[in-house]
Structures are given as structure tokens and as C-alpha cells.
Image: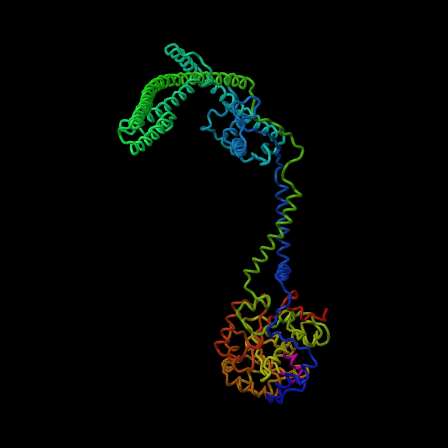
């Protein structure tokens, strides 16, 4: 058993037809009000982009045509311009055939080339060309003066013609430099090809001549300055040489080999000998001091003397024998006397040997002192001689430096004179401007291609700008931006062409006024538009399973948004499933009776004023199961009664008892209060907005008013007259051509 049937059974609605219980089984259900309503899987930004282009294709095509036409017209009206190019090869300073400068490598070369590019664009050079071309009086060079110099002698005072010509010349001048080479390209544009070529060639000629003249003047100034410096250096050189000669004569020096250092070696040797003499003297002095302190026995000479060692050993042996003899023989025995005599003689010899060693030490000490004095005196003399030699060498070096500087400057002056005579330059004209056969610009093909590229881009930008500034609702996404969390549906554009018997049957008398109001479910039941209405019907039936919405209010924000069309077609769709009645509640602008081909007669207004009964006001629409309650005559007190809830509830109660579905077509919400009152007594509200008519602000305000009066639930928000390119429309196109 279906969900809808269970809802009907629980609610106890016995007046509903049996078709409801088989609706889910016999008809596919589409719910625009579900969470995914209005959302097409796979729709990307690219699809949205293409959709906007499809809507604004006329604007894009128009912009493209306008841009291409404007470009073509401007190109055809533009006067031809010729831009011949001349090329210069600019070498950094130092690369000339004769140069005083050392070639510079590295980043300075690039900076130098950029400087020359700026020089080619200077006002002075441009003014020189202008004055020469227009024949200014000061452009004729004086004898011995270059044309460039004469033309730039007064650049602070310009005539009006020169100023205008200079401005125009700078505007037409182009200077380009290829960073990977030393080539600078120059071009001066003109409308005459011969004038363009001659002006460009004149510019590069004056530039090269200007650089050559500047270099020549710089060389001449350098020669003059170096000549003056050379005289001073020659005087210093002569003075230095005379000082050396006088020093040699005064001190007796002769020219010696600079590679030898005799005096230095002699001073070093004397210093070494003096050091050794001082060391010997100190050592001997210490030995003499020991002797004076009665420490002669500690002299190293005594310990090393073999004679003293022998005498000492013999003396010890004799003393030993003497001591033994005294014990054995007594002190007066001849042997004792003999041993005492030997001991005394050995002692005398030992003392004599020690005295000899001591005298030798003292003699060596005196000799060391004398040698020290001699070495010190000789060292002082050698030091004085070395000082004089250093002064002599310093004077010779100064004289030699002056001589070398003089020779260097002399050779440099000779090279400079040769360079000045050669007039070599670091600028070479490798290609002069030629007279062009075809103009450089305008280029018609290129301009048209750029126009065809820029036109669509501009059109697309304007299209998106127009879409961004357009506050009207076009798609379901626009409706979602109104901060609505309501079910959404679409009804595509309903064409006004009437086909078939049913269409003619419901065709109104004034076709132009009521265009688009025909009940398409009768005229085109198999169309995609009819399927959209049936989908809306299904969504409304399934919107409240526990309490079926029997009475539905169809309303909109403002007139002309298609609420009557939606109400009538929805009533026809509901009538196909059960007894239905459509009520025309718009007393100010009634349309339903005219659409159905009925003349003006009694209706809702008469019922509200008590003139007729409800059954008398209802008439059969000629459609199975569909009845109509027209608005009737617009009576004065009917407006007050339609906004009175009790009167409308009584009317609606009678319709509920008789019909399974009641569809109320109300006036706009923003314009009149009728729709707000009716929204409080129905079971649900269907809010209609028209694509490219309804604004987001109007829809937001309408929904706020309905919320403020505590209206019935808004069961569906319908986007009427949705364009066929809408992604949501593709759901309803399934199976239809």
C-alpha cells in the first residue's frame, strides 16, 4: 500500500476520489520540494557560464560586431605610417681601435648600453635633428664646429614651431635595445616613407658624430692635461737624479748592484760576533767572580785538567802512606820525614797548577772584554754605513719612479695623439633605414583579429555584468538566494499558440490581452509544459501526507507573474484526478471567466454580499470534474467582505464539502491585502514568481508579509515561464520533443 494511500486513510478524508490510492503506482512522482529540487547533478560553473552566454548571446554578438566594426572603421580612416629601422652597434669604452681606456667587463656594459639608449632619446639630440630638418638659423655650423654642437648650443630657448616639432618628434621616436646583444635599433615614424627614412638616418648620423666629437674633444683635453703633468714630472725627475749624484759624491758611494746586500750581511755577521763575544765575556766573568769568592776548586778547567787529577791522586796516596808510617814508626822516623817532604812537594805542584789555570781564566776574560769592545765599535760603524746606504737607495728609487712615470706618460701622450688623429669611435652604423614600400601600420588583418578577440571578451564581460546587476529571478538558484528553505518547482514558458479543438474551445475573445492563459493540459497534454504542471500537482498532493491540502491559494508578488495561468492549469490537472473547483478571488482584475469563454455573470462578489447562493455562483467549465467560481460583478461592499476571514471561511467550507480540490486565484500579495487574508484560511499556499519579471526583493518582501500574518504553510514556490535552457527544465523534457 502506497504512502499516499496510508495518509488518506489516516486522515479520514472520504470525499477524495479513489485515484489517489493508485497515484503512486500509475504516475511517476517528481517532487520539486525535495532536498534536491531544482538541482541538476553535474551542473558545473562551465554549464552556468554557457547558460549565461546562451541567454545573453545577442549582447555578445552585438558587442563583437560593434568592436569589429569600430576597429575596421578606425583602421580604414587611419593615415598610413611608415617606421623604418636603423641599427647601431655600440661598443663599451675601451673597444675602439685606438683607445686610452681599458675594456670593462661585466654589468657595466649593460648599464652603458642603457645610458646610450637614453641619450638617443634625449631632447638635445632630437632638437639637433629637428633644427637641421626644418632649417633653423642656428643649425648651420660655424667653421671648425660640428653640426651637432651648433644645433645644441642653445636648447633653453625654443620657438613655438621648434617646441611643437620637438614634441611631435619625441612622440614618433622609438629606441629599442636587445639585452642579448650590443645592437640598438632606432626608428622615427612618419606618414611619408622617404621622410621617415631620412629622419631616422639623420638621427643615427648625428648621434654617431656627436659621440665621435665628444670623444675627440675628451682626447684633446686629456693630451693637454697630460702635457702639463709631464712637464712637472720631468722637473721632479731631474731634481731626483741630481740629488742622487750629490749624495754619491758627498758620501763616496758608487753605483752598486741592487741585487746584492753586502752591507746587510756584514752587519749581520758583526752582530753575531758581538753576541758571541758578550756571551764569552759573561761566562768568564762568572768564573773570575768565583775565584774571588774563594771557590777556585769549582772551576771546570780544574776538573777537566789531567795534571791536577794526577797530582791530587799522588798526594792522596802519599798522605795515606804518611799516616800509616806515623802510626808504625813515629813522627821522627826517616820514612816519615821523607813522606812529609814528598807530600809538601806534591802540594806545592798542585797549587802551582791551579794558579796557572786561574791566570789563564783571567787572561781569557780580559781578552773577551777587549773583543766585545771592538765588535761593538765595528757594529756601530757598519750601522751608520747601512743607514747612509738606505738613504741612497731611497733616493735612487724615487729617481727611478720619476723616470718610469715620465716614460709612461710620454708613451701615453703619443698613443693619445695617434687615437685623436685616427678619429676612431665605439659606435658603428650597421644598417641604415631604407624607404619602405608598405606602411608599418595600420595592419588591417591584425586589427580585425584583435577586434574579433576583444569583441567577445567585452561582450562576455558585459553579459556577466548585466547578469550580476540584474535583480530579477531567472533560475531556481536565484530563488534560493532569497534565503528560502522552501520546496521549489518550475513551469516552463507556455506558448500562446492554440492547437486542437480544446484550444479553440477555450480561446478568449481578446487574444492579445489574454495571451498565454490557455489551459495547456487540454490543448497540449503531451507537452513538457503540461508535464511540469502535473509534477507540481504531484508535489502538492505528497507535501502533507497526514493532512491532504484540499484548499490551495495561488498568489504572487505583483501582477503579470502568471499566477492565473498556474492556477487554471493546476485546477485542470487536479480535475483529472477528482472533483475540483477554481475560485477567481481577484475582484479587480478577473481573468478566469474570460479565458474559459464565459460572459460576465454573477459569482463570488454576489455570494459575499448575500445576493445569490453558492450553488448559483458556480458553473461548469466544460472540463470533466472542473467547476469555476468566478469573481462576479465588482461591488463596493464585496471588497470589504473578501478581506473578512469569516465570510471567506463560510464560502470555503461549502466548497470543501462539495469538491476534493479547491484552487483560489488571489490578487498579488504586495499590491492588495486580499491574498494575505486568504492565505490564513487555506490549507497551503503556492507562491508564483515569473522568470525575468519577479525580483528577489519583491519575493523576499512577499514571503515576509505571509510570515507576518501567520499564513498557511507555503507548500511550493513556482518559477513560472522558466526558459527552455534552464537545467531544471530538462527534467520535464524527458520523452518530449
Residue at figure coordinates x 64%, y 36% from the top left: 439
Residue 315 seen: yes
Q: Is residue 571 magenta?
A: yes
Image height check: is 449 above or below 277?
A: below
State which quadrant residue 209 falls in. top right
State which quadrant residue 314 falls in. top left
Report the front residue among 574 and 407.
407
Image height check: is 403 above or below 603?
A: above
Looking at the rendering, in which quadrant would you find the C terminus?
Answer: bottom right
| Residue 677 position within the rendered picture, expressed as x and y whole percent measured from the top left | 51, 79
| Residue 273 placement, left or right of 522 | left
Looking at the rendering, in which quadrant would you find the N terminus?
Answer: bottom right
Residue 622 seen: no
Report the front residue among 318 and 380.
318
| Residue 502 placement, left or right of 417 | right
- Give the number of marks: 0
| Residue 591 position within the rendered picture, expressed as x and y whole percent measured from the top left | 60, 75
Image height check: is 266 above or below 518?
A: above
| Residue 694 position within the rendered picture, expressed as x and y whole percent measured from the top left | 56, 68
Which residue range is magenta in the image?
Answer: 570-580
Residue that lies at the very extreme toward the top in this rendered image: 249
| Residue 258 placement, left or right of 634 | left
Amino acid at each position: 500500500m502506497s504512502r499516499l494511500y496510508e495518509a488518506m486513510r489516516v486522515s479520514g478524508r472520504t470525499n477524495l476520489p479513489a485515484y489517489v490510492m493508485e497515484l503512486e503506482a500509475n504516475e511517476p512522482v517528481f517532487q520539486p520540494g525535495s532536498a534536491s529540487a531544482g538541482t541538476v547533478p553535474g551542473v558545473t560553473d562551465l554549464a552556468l557560464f554557457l547558460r549565461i552566454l546562451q541567454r545573453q548571446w545577442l549582447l555578445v554578438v552585438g558587442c563583437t560586431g560593434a568592436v569589429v566594426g569600430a576597429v575596421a572603421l578606425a583602421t580604414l580612416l587611419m593615415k598610413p605610417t611608415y617606421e623604418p629601422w636603423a641599427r647601431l652597434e655600440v661598443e663599451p669604452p675601451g673597444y675602439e681601435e685606438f683607445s686610452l681606456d681599458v675594456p670593462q667587463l661585466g654589468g657595466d656594459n649593460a648599464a652603458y648600453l642603457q645610458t646610450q639608449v637614453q641619450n638617443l632619446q634625449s631632447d638635445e639630440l632630437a632638437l639637433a635633428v629637428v633644427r637641421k630638418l626644418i632649417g633653423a638659423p642656428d643649425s648651420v655650423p660655424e667653421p671648425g664646429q660640428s653640426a651637432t654642437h651648433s644645433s645644441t648650443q642653445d636648447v633653453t630657448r625654443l620657438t613655438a614651431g621648434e617646441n611643437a616639432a620637438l614634441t611631435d618628434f619625441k612622440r614618433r621616436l622609438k629606441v629599442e635595445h636587445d639585452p642579448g646583444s650590443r645592437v640598438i635599433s632606432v626608428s622615427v615614424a612618419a606618414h611619408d616613407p622617404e621622410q621617415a627614412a631620412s629622419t631616422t638616418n639623420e638621427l643615427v648620423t648625428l648621434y654617431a658624430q656627436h659621440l665621435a666629437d665628444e670623444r675627440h674633444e675628451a682626447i684633446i683635453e686629456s693630451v693637454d692635461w697630460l702635457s702639463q703633468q709631464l712637464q712637472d714630472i720631468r722637473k721632479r725627475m731631474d731634481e731626483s737624479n741630481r740629488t742622487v749624484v750629490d749624495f754619491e759624491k758627498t758620501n763616496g758611494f758608487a753605483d752598486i748592484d741592487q741585487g746584492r746586500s753586502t752591507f746587510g750581511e756584514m752587519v749581520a755577521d758583526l752582530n753575531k760576533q758581538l753576541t758571541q763575544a758578550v756571551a764569552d765575556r759573561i761566562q768568564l766573568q762568572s768564573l773570575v767572580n768565583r775565584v774571588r769568592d774563594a771557590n777556585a776548586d769549582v772551576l771546570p778547567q780544574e776538573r777537566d785538567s789531567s795534571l791536577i787529577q794526577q797530582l791530587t791522586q799522588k798526594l792522596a796516596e802519599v798522605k795515606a802512606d804518611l799516616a800509616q808510617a806515623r802510626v808504625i814508626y813515629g813522627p821522627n822516623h826517616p820514612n816519615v820525614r821523607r813522606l812529609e817532604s814528598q807530600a809538601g812537594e806534591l802540594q806545592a805542584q798542585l797549587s802551582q797548577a791551579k794558579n796557572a789555570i786561574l791566570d789563564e781564566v783571567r787572561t781569557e776574560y780580559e781578552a773577551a772584554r777587549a773583543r766585545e769592545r771592538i765588535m761593538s765599535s765595528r757594529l756601530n760603524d757598519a750601522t751608520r754605513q747601512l743607514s747612509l746606504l738606505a738613504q741612497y737607495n731611497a733616493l735612487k728609487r724615487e729617481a727611478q719612479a720619476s723616470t718610469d712615470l715620465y716614460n709612461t706618460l710620454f708613451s701615453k701622450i703619443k698613443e693619445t695623439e695617434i687615437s685623436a688623429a685616427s678619429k676612431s669611435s665605439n659606435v658603428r652604423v650597421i644598417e641604415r633605414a631604407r624607404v619602405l614600400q608598405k606602411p608599418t601600420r595600420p595592419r588591417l588583418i591584425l586589427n580585425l583579429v584583435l577586434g574579433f578577440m576583444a569583441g567577445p571578451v567585452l561582450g562576455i564581460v558585459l553579459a556577466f555584468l548585466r547578469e550580476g546587476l540584474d535583480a530579477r529571478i531567472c533560475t531556481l538558484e536565484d530563488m534560493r538566494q532569497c534565503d528560502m528553505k522552501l520546496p521549489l518547482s518550475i513551469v516552463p514558458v507556455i506558448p500562446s499558440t492554440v492547437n486542437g479543438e480544446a484550444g479553440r474551445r477555450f480561446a478568449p475573445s481578446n487574444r492579445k490581452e489574454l495571451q498565454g492563459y490557455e489551459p495547456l493540459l487540454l490543448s497540449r497534454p503531451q507537452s513538457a509544459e503540461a508535464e511540469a504542471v502535473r509534477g507540481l500537482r504531484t508535489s502538492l498532493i505528497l507535501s502533507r501526507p497526514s493532512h491532504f491540502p484540499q484548499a490551495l491559494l495561488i498568489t504572487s508578488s505583483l501582477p503579470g507573474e502568471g499566477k492565473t495561468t498556474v492556477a487554471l492549469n493546476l485546477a485542470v490537472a487536479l480535475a483529472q484526478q477528482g472533483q475540483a473547483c477554481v475560485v477567481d478571488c481577484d475582484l479587480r482584475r478577473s481573468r478566469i471567466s474570460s479565458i474559459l469563454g464565459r460572459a460576465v455573470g454573477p459569482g463570488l462578489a454576489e455570494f459575499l454580499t448575500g445576493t445569490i447562493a453558492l450553488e448559483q455562483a458556480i458553473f461548469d467549465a466544460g472540463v470533466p470534474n472542473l467547476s469555476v467560481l468566478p469573481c462576479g460583478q465588482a461591488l463596493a461592499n464585496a471588497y470589504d467582505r473578501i478581506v473578512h476571514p469569516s465570510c471567506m471561511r463560510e464560502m470555503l467550507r461549502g466548497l470543501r464539502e462539495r469538491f476534493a480540490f479547491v484552487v483560489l486565484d488571489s490578487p498579488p500579495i504586495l499590491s492588495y491585502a486580499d491574498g494575505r487574508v486568504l492565505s490564513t484560511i487555506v490549507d497551503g499556499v503556492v507562491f508564483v514568481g515569473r522568470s525575468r519579471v519577479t525580483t528577489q526583493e519583491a519575493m523576499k518582501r512577499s514571503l515576509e508579509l505571509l510570515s507576518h500574518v501567520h499564513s498557511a504553510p507555503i507548500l511550493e514556490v513556482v518559477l513560472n515561464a522558466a526558459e527552455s535552457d534552464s537545467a531544471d527544465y530538462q527534467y520535464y523534457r524527458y520523452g518530449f520533443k
